[in-house]
Image: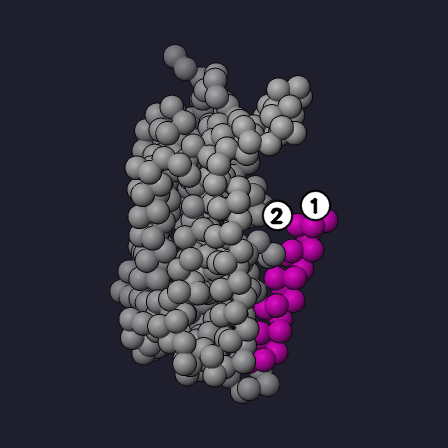
Amino acid sequence: RLAAIAQLLLGLALLALVARHLDRSGELQHLGAAFQSALIRWPLLLLGFAGFGVCLFVCALRWQIILRAQQFDLPFRRTTTLYLIGQFFNAFMLGATGGDLVKALYVARETHHQKTEIVTSIFIERAFGLLAIIALAPLSMLLRRAEFWNHPGARVMLLIFAGLLLTTVVGLLVIFGGNRFEQLPFLRRLGKSHRIGDIIRRVYDAFHMTMRHRGLLTRAILLSALNHLAFVASACAFGHAAGLSLGVTGYLAAFFAINLASAIPITPSGIGTRETAALVLLGALGVPDAQAVTVSLMLYGTLLAWSLIGGIVYGITAFRSQKPRS
């Protein structure tokens, strides 16, 4: 709980720094005008809202195919319902995995076997999304490498993301290059002699099976790419509403990286980190600070709106589950 509160305070502190920067640069007074300009182009806002919804439905589909790989066939409607409920709790509960734990509880109630593997599928699904954006962010930044490299803040982010990608690739090769529970005597003994060791082994086996399953891996990677492209399309709609002229390469280069920055779990739902990354990366591409923050806040507002929809779904689901059956 203290860690979650610290994350919230960090996010608010970052927002305060962003506001201070806008005030010092004289851009704060233009923030309201940028929002008003965007509201006039409301069809683009609706398009951006719909694009973010596509992200959630694609993620629900990705989770469904991972569940099927664990021999649990959950209907897409039910998968989507649980995903929206998880989105609600991720946005409004302190802590980065509140929604994942809620989804785990729901799914665990619906099965009497392989609970560990099925609960693990939630974190496998999250891992695919994170791995995809870790790869896409630094690679897409190369599309506008000259602008990013000449901007001190953007150059630091490019180097950090490139290092994160390299570390991730090496880590995956080390962890999943072979079945470590079969190769290392210590892990083999742990898995056989202790209850916690058995749980760790089953979690590892679920991850290992997913990473070695070529058909599943291909579909999960394609859906992950589609998810992040839908996010960029949503950002593009908001950007055009706010008057940004970045071109296709600009949106890809900036918003994959902004998405990765907001995915790092140091603040709730990326609050503060998203706006800071938008200032740096969009600023490197010549976007005025007020417009950059406007688009970032619209993305965050859309996330909250879809999370509220998840809250409505949760309320309906909870009501139906408590309604007495005739």
Q: Residue at x 58, y 75 (%)?
A: 19
Q: Does the segment drawn in magenta span residue 14?
A: yes
Q: Does the segment drawn in magenta span residue 34?
A: no
Amino acid type at mark 1: Arg
From where the camera sits, is residue 9 visible?
yes
Which disc is residue 158 wearing?
Answer: none
Q: Residue at x 31, y 48 (%)?
A: 222
SS at badge 2? loop
SS at badge 1? loop
For this view, does 210 lie left or right of residue 16?
Answer: left
Amino acid type at mark 2: Leu
* Relative vertical location of residue 229 with respect to residue 36 in this rendering, above or below: above
Q: Which residue is mark 1?
A: 1
Q: Residue at x 61, y 68 (%)?
A: 14
Residue span colored magenta: 1-22
Whether the residues at callouts 1 and 2 have beta carbons within 8 Å, the answer is yes
